[in-house]
Amino acid sequence: MNSMSKENDTKTGKSTAYSPAEVEDRLYKKWLDSGAFVGNPKSSKKPYTIVIPPPNVTDVLHLGHALNNSIQDILIRRHRMMGFEAVWIPGADHAGIATQVIVEKRLAKEGTTRREMGREKFLERTREWAYGNKDKILNQLRKMGCSCDWTRTRFTLDEGLSRAVAEVFKHLYEKGWIYRGHRIVNWCPSCQTSLSDDEVEHVEFDSHLWYIRYKLKGSDEYLTVATTRPETMLGDTALAVSPKDMRYKRFVGKTIILPILEREIPVVADSYVDPEFGTGVVKVTPAHDPNDFEIGKRHDLEEINILNTDGSLNENAGKFKNLDRFEARKQLVDELSRKGHLEKIDKYKLAAGTCYRCHNVVEPYLSEQWFVKMSELAQPATAAVKTGSLRFHPDYWSKTYLHWMENIRDWCISRQLWWGHRIPIWYAEDGTMFVSMDRPKKEDLPDGYNPEDLTQDDDVLDTWFSSWLWPFSTMGWPDNTPDLQKFYPTKVLSTASEIIFLWVARMVMAGYEFVGEQPFSDVYIHGTVRDANGIKMSKSLGNGIDPLEIIEKYGADSLRISLTLATPDGQDPWISKNTFEIGRNFVNKLHQVSRFVMMRLDGRQPVLDRIDENDLVIFDRWILSRLERTIRTVDRNFAEFRLSAATKTLYNFVWNDYCSWYIELIKPDQPGQEIRPGSLNVATYVLDKIVKLLHPFVPFVTERIYLDLVGQEIEGEATIVFGPWPTTDGRFIDDELEASLEQIQAVVTAVRSMRSELNVPPGKKSDLYVQVDDPTFAELLQGHIEYFRSLARVNDLHTGTRIKRPAPSATAVISGAEIFLPLEGLIDIEVERNRVEKELQNLAVQLEKVSKKLANQDFLANAPADIIDREKAKKADYQDRIEKLNKNLEQIMGW
RNA sequence: GGGCGGUUAGCUCAGCUGGUUAGAGCACCUGCCUUACACGCAGGGGGUCACAAGUUCGAAUCUUGUACCGCCCACCA
């Protein structure tokens, strides 16, 4: 840091930089104490509800969550200010498999297992850990300033939500849409549970195709089979060929001796087999491949399971028993090779399914599971998007959603885990099933059944089976509560794209089926947070950042607005540590400009709700015009779910229009002078609108400034939380006036540029000569010289239509004016000549372009008249400026 | 194998219905302790808009194709 820099306030010696730590916690407490975030179902205001995507209790929140929750808070806070009964329901998800995997890992380190512990103790242990994380997570949201209604906090394992789960199970079971089936499912040998299709991630591996020879019984002939999983041959119960394949027609019906195990298996003909692929012969392993399972059904083949639940081989594998699947593969291939059964090995790229939680390769595995029939559920959920009653932002995600809906498959909902909602099914000894969350009561059972004789299904439900009910289970469903009546359906769901299928799509189905109405109308899909190298941020990769770390260093406001600014609408943000400096700088800028306004108010009570329209100078009208335009743009950005654009619009308005121009323009020439009262009023009025427009993004600093404006302490009654959100009737929007201001700005900028390029010392002031084409321009300048004198470091202004160049002086030509700066002794003729020549070259290029265009007959014949006029005006302007510059260049050469 | 995004200044991104001298922030260079802000102010340099063809009077913007990057879906063993 430069020792000359003025880090401190000259009077007090204290740093004037904004210090978030001093105000954030106190402000948050103020909001909580006043109940500002609590929704009232009896309110006459229109509801605006968001349910939080409940974070998994497996871990504290990372920057991805910080982004998502910033977005939700922005939407909620803005609507609260707009007069809606805005409710944001917070909570957390028990994250069945994810949580259990982590707890089991910890147990392993301690040298024990869940089975050793037993179900009750294990659940107790998991609960303790999960609830600890949940508290940490909810605290992170508070530190971020999230305006959640904490009186409505929910957890997916809460009593009420569990009741909803059981109710839904019963509903679907009685409808026949939940069924139990003996089927091939995705099995994770590491987590030792089934997974739904959507929980399997396909990863490409470099693998091989093994070509194995299967000998015909009583012959030396053989058939060669290509396989990617040779170990599954231990469970083969047939070979299959295409019925159209003439090469193998004579083998159909013959018997094959399975290598190594020497079992006899038939050759069958099945149209599933593609004669073009591999050898055209397929080994059929009904217990370990979904297609083979189907073939097996068609040909009445035996299903031989060769795997234990942990992925090791079982007694059906003969001598390979107890070996892990991959070790068994190795040894089996060796033996096949030794015995001459291995024809060749090809390299092969294989897309293998892996578990989305532990990333081990999953196995197709035959087992007894519960499924939900999805086709009917998908109907209204598909229609909702097709008719536009449910919209995705950006819209292209609706294609992804529809593709999944239209190819929907039944949902395997049972998990061989303990952490979660236990399947509400009770079995009698005779196999009869009863649906009930708790042990059924005697009076609810048919004659001949006793509650004590029933045993509950051991498995739990997929974690998403509770999540998909979240938009209404959090409101007390299945009871028709006041909350449900007032706050359902919710408005916006904000999430990342990765859970569109797992969660979003299923919530839509559930909303229609169980409540009869879609759960939300808009789905906002934001990008995935990546690090500075574009790698997705995650705890496991070690590149994750804890939002609390950023908050501690920069403050919650900086965290929030930096993330919003850094996240392009619909794309992935790349975040590095200094990403947050943008936000910190902006928050400080806001703080500083408000300090300036407050100092100038000097204790006077400002008027925030109106301005005296008879007491405005051109600059006041200009900033009001810019303000109204900004409000319109921001509202439009929000309507289109372009949050990044909205943030940038406000950022630019505050920094450029308000701070850099307006405040500088109304500053008096001399330090001691007061700002013109009418302008100070406008400055304050606009500042009030600025903090309101920005409050959803940076809630703390804006509340702090607002309280300063209304002259209250943090603990006072006043608050910005309820806005109102600034509106506009557009009556100050004035194109002509903005154009006039741009002329003044152009003069100021030209002067600054000349001075800088000629290295004029900042302290050196000079007179300013402006030769104009149009006398009204001169009047404009003359009338406002007092305002921009210090910006351009000007003593006297000489302007009019007949101003002569004072020699020696620097020259600039802008549209409609020539600017002269008499700088005797300060002008290096060479430098000045280069400057002018450079500008001439620049203009020459532009002139050539436009001249060419205007010489083109097709252009003149086809282009609209206003475009042609504009080009003509441009040409005239360039010509004029070139002429003037040339004249000036001649004079310079004459020195 | 199918689908969807992306490719604009050294970096991260704007540029909405085709006509702007193609912009911003960061980084870089120059000057500055200017009456709120050095977390700042002023000025400046830097781009054949991935490539090719097409539509058009006119293309960063529309169409088609190619290349590369990323994501998603998929039961070819």
Image (cartoon, coloured by chain):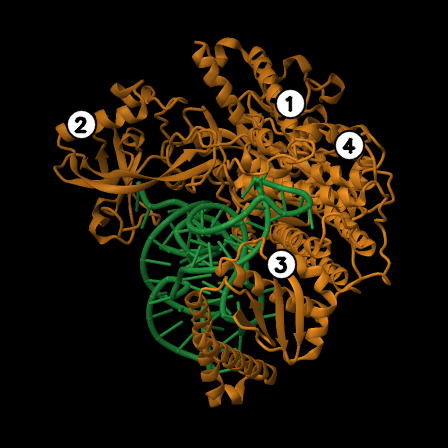
Chain colours: A orange, B green
Residue A294 x %, y %: 40, 41
Q: Quadrant of the C terminus of chain A?
A: bottom left
* Chain of residue at mark 3: A
- The dot on residue A135 is 1
Residues at discs 3 and 2 in contact (Cβ within 8 Å): no
Asked whether the residues under marks 3 and 2 belong to the same chain, the reply is yes
Q: Residue at x 57, y 30 (%)?
A: A553
The correct choice, above or below, for A41 with respect to A427 in the image is: below
Q: A227 or B74: nearer the eye?
A: B74
1 or 4: mark nearer the eye? 4
First along the sequence among labels 2 and 1: 1
Q: A832 or A570: nearer the eye?
A: A832
Residue A649 x %, y %: 64, 54
First along the sequence among labels 3 and 1: 1
The correct choice, above or below, for A845 with respect to A670 in the image is: below
How far apart in space, not on screen, are marks 1 and 4 (Cα)? 20 Å
3 or 1: mark nearer the eye? 3
The correct choice, above or below, for A118 with respect to A77 in the image is: above
First along the sequence among labels 1 and 4: 4
2 or 4: mark nearer the eye? 4
* Chain of residue at mark 2: A
Residue A449 x %, y %: 68, 17
The amino acid type, in three-letter code, at marker 3 is: Arg
Relative side of A417 to A263, left or right: right
Q: What crowding class fits label 2: few (fewer than 14 Cα within 10 Å), some (14-19), or many (20 or more)?
A: some
First along the sequence among labels 3 and 2: 2
* Chain of residue at mark 1: A
Q: Residue at x 48, y 77 (%)?
A: A891
